[in-house]
Image: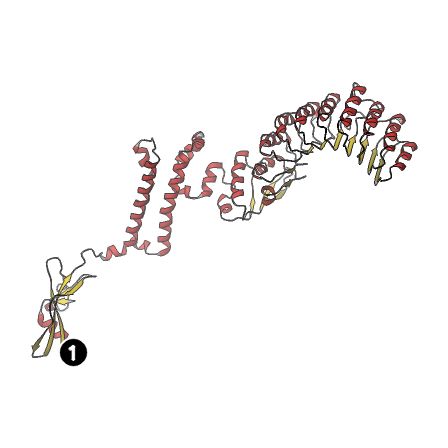
């Protein structure tokens, strides 16, 4: 505070007889204060006030003056007023102004991004994409400046601006992605969506998948258990991309099976294990929500899907991905309702599994057409050591195709054939040409002399038993022999007895629903290492 009247300044400067100090300040047209006389209770004092942040500079030697009241030290000075000093209103709105400048700077960055991409869109389309920055600036400009002085609000405003820039970059990249451009519906959804939403990765997955039923946001936020609704295969692929990115936190998936029961799947076991076993989970249509995980598991060697009712659609889905499982050594598709239609498609893709050791197709309604289709692919699976085609309904056409295919493998150690259970149990032959079937079965066994386990049920007659028994006599390492429902007479059972007498190292023998004699049982006394003997409903 200053005054233009010297006597007023001198009067206020004296204190208890001490030397008074008066600053003699030189002012100019710009460097000057504001008069308060018009609002002062003492207008006669001609009080002036200098703006904040004004600078006072000593410009001469101090001098001593004398008056009736005492000595006065006068210091010559000059004032430099800060003409850039903000007004009170501007100080209150400082955060708001900073934020508006920030939005402008972010908009300019995005404009540079557009130019750097050498985009061929018209200039007005490019500016239309930046219009959201203008809209946000307008909304924030209308807010009360005091709103920005609350830290929580200011933090929210900054995050909104940064999210807008990030969302703009993501939206821009999606709009210029060739794969997305090929999907017209998705392109339109992206174009109609605010760039601000693209900063949320969860929303991007909603947009790409077309479903909000999956908790995309919480998944990315560290969810440990996720209930997965029924999804399409495309949606499932996108979901598994997210599941894989959340592997450090996500532990369990809950999926409804074909019986309507909720089952739990451990994500780590599906994505990071050599053996994936989903045995008897009855997935049904839910299989397509699990299938994409197999392609993401680089360690996968064994895939057990027995008892999941995946049907032909699941078989087709799986077969289309087999090219990604070339290191697979075990594939169990038993009891899945796969018919000739599904197996025909599978046969076109099975040939890539050159390292496959075990193939199990038991309890599927393949019929002759399905067995023939799979048989076409078997010669390519040169590493196979075990095949299971038990409990499958097929006739002479199927058994001939299958045995001829297995003759080409040379390295089988386990064969299971059981085509007759659903056919004729009345003692009548199920083959049109028994001798041809006997010849092919015997040739299959002779081509694989290292057999250790064989099941020939529902397919033998006396003629076939004699041929097969003669061939099995050459398999010195045989451990397991299983025969059931073969409708053998005494003659046929004795042929088997002669073969058994030559195998003293058999460990397991199982005979069911067949004729066995005391001579047959006596032959087993020579099998010194026999550990298990099953005789079920035998005559």
Expressed as whole percent of the image width and height from the top left, the position of residue 446 reads 78, 26
Q: Relative to residue 503, is residue 89 drawn left or right?
A: left
Q: Residue furthest right?
A: 518
Q: Residue furthest top?
A: 433
Q: In this orientation, does residue 25 appear?
A: yes
- Determine the residue positioned at 56% across, 38% down: 296
- Determine the residue positioned at 45% across, 41% down: 203
The residue wearing badge 1 is 15
Frontmost residue, 193 versus 106: 106
Scheme of image coloration? secondary structure
Expressed as whole percent of the image width and height from the top left, the position of residue 163 reads 39, 45
Q: Relative to residue 261, is residue 206 drawn left or right?
A: left
Expressed as whole percent of the image width and height from the top left, the position of residue 247 reads 54, 46
Q: In this orientation, does residue 137 appear?
A: no
Expressed as whole percent of the image width and height from the top left, the position of residue 524 reads 88, 36
Frontmost residue, 229 versus 496: 496
Circle 1 crowding by C-alpha within 10 Å: few under 14, some 14–19, many from 20: few
């Amino acid at each position: 505070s200053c005054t233009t009247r010297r006597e007023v300044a001198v009067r206020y400067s004296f204190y208890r007889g001490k030397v008074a100090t008066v600053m003699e300040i030189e002012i100019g047209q710009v460097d000057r204060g504001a008069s308060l006389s018009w609002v002062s209770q003492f207008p006669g004092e001609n009080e002036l006030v200098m703006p904040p942040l004004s600078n006072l500079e000593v410009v001469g030697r101090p001098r001593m003056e004398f008056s009736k009241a005492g000595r006065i030290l006068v210091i010559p000075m000059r004032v430099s007023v800060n003409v850039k000093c903000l007004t009170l209103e501007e100080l209150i709105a400082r955060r708001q102004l900073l934020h508006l400048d920030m939005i402008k700077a972010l908009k300019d960055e995005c404009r540079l991004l557009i130019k750097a991409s050498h985009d061929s869109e018209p200039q007005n389309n490019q500016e239309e994409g930046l219009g959201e920055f203008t809209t946000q600036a307008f909304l924030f400009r209308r807010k009360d400046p005091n709103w920005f002085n609350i830290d929580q609000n200011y933090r929210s405003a900054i995050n909104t601006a940064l999210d807008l820039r990030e969302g703009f970059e993501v939206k821009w990249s999606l709009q210029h992605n060739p794969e997305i451009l090929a999907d017209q519906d998705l392109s339109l959804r992206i174009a109609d969506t605010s760039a601000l939403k693209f900063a949320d990765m969860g929303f991007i997955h909603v947009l790409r998948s077309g479903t909000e039923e999956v908790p995309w946001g919480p998944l990315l936020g560290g969810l440990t258990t996720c209930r997965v609704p029924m999804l399409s295969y495309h949606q499932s692929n996108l979901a598994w991309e997210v599941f894989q990115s959340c592997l450090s936190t996500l532990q369990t998936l809950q999926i409804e099976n074909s019986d309507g029961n909720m089952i739990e799947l451990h994500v780590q076991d599906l994505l990071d294990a050599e053996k994936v076993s989903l045995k008897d989970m009855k997935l049904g249509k839910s299989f397509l929500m699990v299938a994409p995980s197999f392609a993401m598991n680089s360690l996968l060697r064994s895939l057990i899907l027995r008892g999941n009712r995946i049907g032909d659609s699941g078989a087709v889905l799986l077969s289309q991905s087999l090219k990604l499982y070339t290191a697979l050594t075990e594939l169990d598709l038993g009891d899945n309702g796969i018919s000739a239609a599904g197996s025909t498609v599978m046969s076109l893709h099975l040939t890539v599994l050159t390292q496959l050791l075990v193939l199990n197709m038991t309890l599927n309604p393949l019929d002759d057409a399905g067995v023939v289709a799979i048989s076409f692919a078997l010669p390519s699976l040169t590493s196979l050591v075990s095949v299971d085609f038990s409990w499958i309904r097929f006739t002479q056409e199927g058994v001939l195709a299958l045995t001829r295919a297995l003759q080409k493998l040379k390295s089988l150690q386990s064969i299971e054939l059981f085509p007759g259970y659903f056919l004729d149990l009345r003692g009548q032959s199920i083959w049109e040409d028994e001798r041809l079937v006997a010849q092919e079965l015997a040739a299959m066994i002779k081509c694989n002399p290292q057999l250790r386990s064989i099941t020939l049920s529902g397919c033998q007659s006396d003629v076939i038993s004699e041929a097969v028994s003669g061939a099995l006599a050459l398999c010195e390492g045989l451990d397991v022999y299983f025969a059931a429902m073969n409708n053998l007479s005494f003659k046929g059972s004795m042929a088997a007895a002669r073969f058994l007498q030559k195998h003293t190292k058999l460990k397991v023998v199982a005979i069911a629903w067949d004729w066995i004699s005391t001579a047959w049982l006596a032959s087993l006394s020579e099998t010194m290492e026999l550990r298990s003997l099953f005789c079920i409903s035998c005559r």
